[in-house]
Structures are given as C-alpha cells and as structure tokens.
Amino acid sequence: MTGVCREVITLQLGHYSNFVGTHWWNLQDASLCYDPGSAPPEVQSDSVFREGQTPGGSVTYTPRLIAMDLKGSLRTLRQEGSLYDPAGATGAAVTWAGSVTVHKHSQLEKNCFLEDLERLDKGQILAEAEFCSTSQLQRSGPLAVDSFNSQLTRLQKNYRLEGSVTVWSDFLRLHLHPRSVAVLHQFNHDGEAHRLETFGQGESALQGALLDELEDRLHFFVEECDYLQGFQVLCDLEDGFAGLGSKVTELLQDSYGGRGILTWGVAPVVHRDSTPAKDRYHLLNAALGTVNMAAHSSLFCPLTLRGALGRRPPPPPLFPLLSYDPALWYHSSAVLALALDALTVPYRLRNNSAPMWQVADSLAVSGRKVVAAYGAVPFPMMPGGSLPDALRACADALPWKPLSACPEAAAGRCYGQWSTLRGFQGQKLISRLSPGIEPPTPLHGLRSGEDVLAAYLSSFYPSAPLVLQLVSAPCKLTPPFPQIFSPALDAQGFIRCGAPPAGGEFCGLCRCGRHLCLNRLSSAAPPVSSVPILTSLQSGTALRPFLSDLQRAAATFDVRRRAPSFLSQGPEMADYQEALEELRLLGRCYHDDSGGTARSSSEDDDDD
C-alpha cells in the first residue's frame, strides 16, 4: 500500500522486553526526520509514533506504547513521565493554598548519559521535565536535531554504561506518554519476596484493577488511530510475564479480531538471579508461554541469543563483526533490537508496505504460527562494493545467525520467508560490468538488487516462497547505543578495505592484500554510527527441534514432585498436560516430509 499510514500499537511486557524495546525506540527516535527540504524517509515513523500536545500547548511526538514492569524497575524514571508535567510544560510553579507535608527521600544517582541529557539544551542545565529528545527537537527544525545528535556523538567516548545500566530506563533517550508505563505493584523487581516467577501468577495478575487499567490504555491509543493494522507484542518468555502475555494476547484477539498480533517472545542469554530451581521455572514458563501466545497471536517468534531454551543450551551464536558480552543485558538486547528494527520493516514502510495480517498469513500456513528469526548483524559489505560481491564472499554459507534458539538456517526445508536488507545506502546493488566482460558469478549478471538477493536465497531454498524488502536507509546508532562492533568496521558499518574481522582472519571481501593490525584499527576507529542489516523471518523445519525439545524437556519433568509450587496459582494439572500436548502437536506441523533429511530417533518418538 502507498501513502496510507497504518498504525501499530506496541506492548512491552517484562523487564528484558523493555530492555529490547528501549534500544528499539532509541533507534526509531534517532532516525526521525522533519526537514521539509529532504525526501520523506522510507520507513514511516507515524506508524509507531503519535502526535500529541502538552497542557502548555507544546506539540509532542511519543511512542504508541504500553510498557508493563514490576515495582522497583524504573529507578529514576517517573511512571507518568515528565513530558506532560504542567510545571515542566509551562515553566510556572504549581501553587497550592492548603497545608503541605514534606516527605524527603534520597535521590537515586543517574549515570553519565542521563546526566548529560540534562545539560544539552544550548549549554543550560535542564531539569528532567524540560529535557528535549530528538522527537521534540524535530519541531524546532533540522538544525536543532543535528546539534543535539552531534553533541551526543562528541560525548560518545565517555559512555561506557556497561557497569552502570541496571534497568532499561538507564539508557532511555526519549520521552514516553503518561499512559505508556504500567507497574504491577504487587510484584517486586528485586529481592526474594513477591516475585513474578510462574506462568500461573502472570495469568492471575491480569484481572480486576490491572485489567481495567490495561483496557483503558488500549482504548486511548486505539481510538486515535485511523487505520490500525495491529499490535506488536514483546513479552518475556521465561518468567511470570509469559502467563500475563498469554492473557494479554487473548484479550487482543477477543477485542480486536481481524487486526494483526505479532508476538515476540524474548529471553536473555543469562538470568541475573538464576538458580537450578528458577531454571526449571524458566523452562516451564517458556513451554506454556510459547504454545499459549502462539494460539492467541497471528504470528509468534521466539527472539533470543540463547542457543536453545532447554537446560543445557549450546553457546550463543557468534557474529563475526560484533564484540559483545552475551551475558550483559545491555549488550544482548542491543543486538536483538537491531535485528528487530529490520524484521519489522515490512509493515512500517511508507510505500509498498505489507500490513501485519499479510505477513502473518503468508507464513502461518497449515497451523504453523511459530516462526524463526535470523540476522546478519551487521551484514558484511565494503565501501564501493556491490551486493553480488558481498554475497559471493559468504561462499556456501548464509550470512545470518539464528535469533530464535533454532538450528542454523538452510538445514531442512523452508516453507516461506520474509527477508529484509536494510542500510546499503551509497553501495551498489548490482555489478556494473564493462561490455564484453564475463560476469564472475551469475549474481553479477543480474539487473536489480531484488533479483540478486532473490537468486542467492533461492539457491538455498529452491522452492520456498520468498518476499524481499530492500531499504536503503540504515539504522542510525546514536548514544547511548553500545559500541559493540569490530574495529574492522568504518563509521557507516562497512568493512574497511584491508581490515580483517574479529578474530584476525582476512575478510573475504577484501582483494587488496593489505593487512592492518587490529590494535591499530581499534585505536583509529571512529564510533560506528550506522550499520547494514540482513534479516529473515522464516517458517521451516528448523523449528521442529526447537518445539520438540522444549515440549520433551517440560513433559519429562515431574512438576508435581519437583516443583509443586509452580502450579499453586494455576494452571490446573489437566490444563498443564493439555498445553504440553498442544505443544507436541504444534512441533509436528514442522515435520520435514520432503525426504531430503534424515530424522532423529527423538523426532520419530514424537510421532508415536
């Protein structure tokens, strides 16, 4: 569709979901552009942002977002925010004629990034209520935006937040609407008591006042939409939010039938307070959350850097051009947010967008509503190179890594996929050969970027339906996005000529024969300000072992004997067993009946 903005409402349920979501919203905020002299951006920000007005009459531009978390999870962030604070909006003091009681408490310390946000309005020290994010500065013109981002960029070397980020608001760079943040006050973020640990707790929580509050917030955002296409839900998969998310997606399905519901079940590589008992809870929550949220969603995609969701997962995937700590939530959520930015592009484009329902209907065929995500973060390209050159350098292996705790792509059969290449701005999509020159590969003889990428992917999945989206503009990386990239990358995220990637080996794209020391590269490398990304959203047989292993691990665990408290607030034992049986049947939907791959004995057992 061209020209019509189809709105999306985002829900973030749980602390790690809010980590991923905060990075994702920071990326969107950094990419906003209101320069009347520039061409409209390819990705339409109005699909996920909303325009509003403060009590003082100032125009605002905030995420169309509902974020839920636990008591004690916000630290310095006020639940209602400060953007719509009457005192902050007008600059006038609030007066009160009655008596006043003063309650004093110690102020939480802010990290260096949050402190700098208070200083970046023309050199003045700002109160939190007066701070303008990029989304507000857009209204003052492009020069204000450029000044804001350039000042943050100059301070980039000072932002090493790895030791100071404890909650997601520690790196949030934009304002949220007063109706965005909802807190479950009956559960604590820290400590041992009153924790949201089980699926049944989450299911039981969504009732009474909390249910009314959620419905009110949904109605507020829905009623101002002209062409609501649906909801994108990020939900923690391994704690009690899995149960709450199951109830939330059920509510969306019942109340807004016909709208798309794309649910991303997120999980960190390492839980901060993990114990053997809690790890068993994580496994059971993931099993129940997967089958229930898949049933209530148009499409469900696990999103994690974990090698698997079982009790002994393999190591996280290795990204050749990243240098990150998988155990650090601030890092792992940044990688997932980069991938999510590209994965969600199809229904956010200004022109030729595909609504959520179309994406879901093309992949969720024959009951296969669980899909897998893959990403090349970043996609290896060289300045001045071409897309055929980049793909040829990948040789016989796909460039992306699994982001859904599934095996590597290309193992088994693919039923269909949506693939997005974002951020190739300034690079050639085709090879421009001189007349009479024989193309070095068939890809070099093709006449469009879509044809090049389609031919390459079809060589791995010859009969699979394929939809491609190519977006020139990259993700803009501004502070406080962590600098987790290889020193082999230049500021635009492309591989510098002669530079070996992380690990010291030569890059297959480089033909110059020069070898640069990684230490020299690191000392001279500027901060990476954008990166190209290639992602794929797939339905295929790679999901069979993910679903089967998850079901088998939960089914073989004697929950009544070894974790009786898990079912104390639901579900009933019969419902629990029924859910595991539905998960087993869901896994069978991904059976490879092509005869092209051998089946394991465990998969044969599942069919008995």
Image (spheres, rainbow, N blue to C red):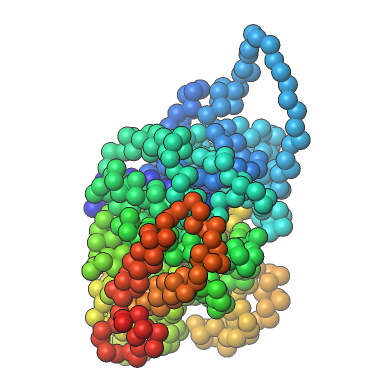
Residue found 43% across the figure and 40% down from its top? 207
Residue found 33% across the figure and 56% down from its top? 297
Residue 416, quarter of picture: bottom left
Looking at this view, is 165 or 321 the one in front? 165
In the rendered image, the quadrant that contains the C terminus is bottom left
Looking at this view, is 137 or 419 the one in front? 419
Q: Where does the image place residue 418, in percent across and percent down from the top left?
A: 32, 67
Is 295 situated above or below 604? above
- Label count reads 0
Q: Where does the image place residue 243, in percent across and percent down from the top left?
A: 45, 53
The answer to whether 563 appears left or right of 294 in the picture is right
Mark yes or no: residue 591 visible.
Answer: yes
Residue 582, quarter of picture: bottom left
The answer to whether 164 appears left or right of 568 in the picture is right
Q: Where does the image place residue 407, in percent across and percent down from the top left?
A: 44, 79
Mark yes or no: residue 451 visible.
Answer: no
Is 500 situated above or below 25? below
Residue 602, quarter of picture: bottom left
Residue found 51% across the figure and 22% down from its top? 56
Q: Where does the image place residue 553, in percent across and percent down from the top left?
A: 47, 74
Residue found 31% across the figure and 71% down from its top? 585
- The residue sitting at the front extreme is 561
The answer to whether 446 appears left or right of 425 in the picture is left
Looking at this view, is 287 or 385 the one in front? 287
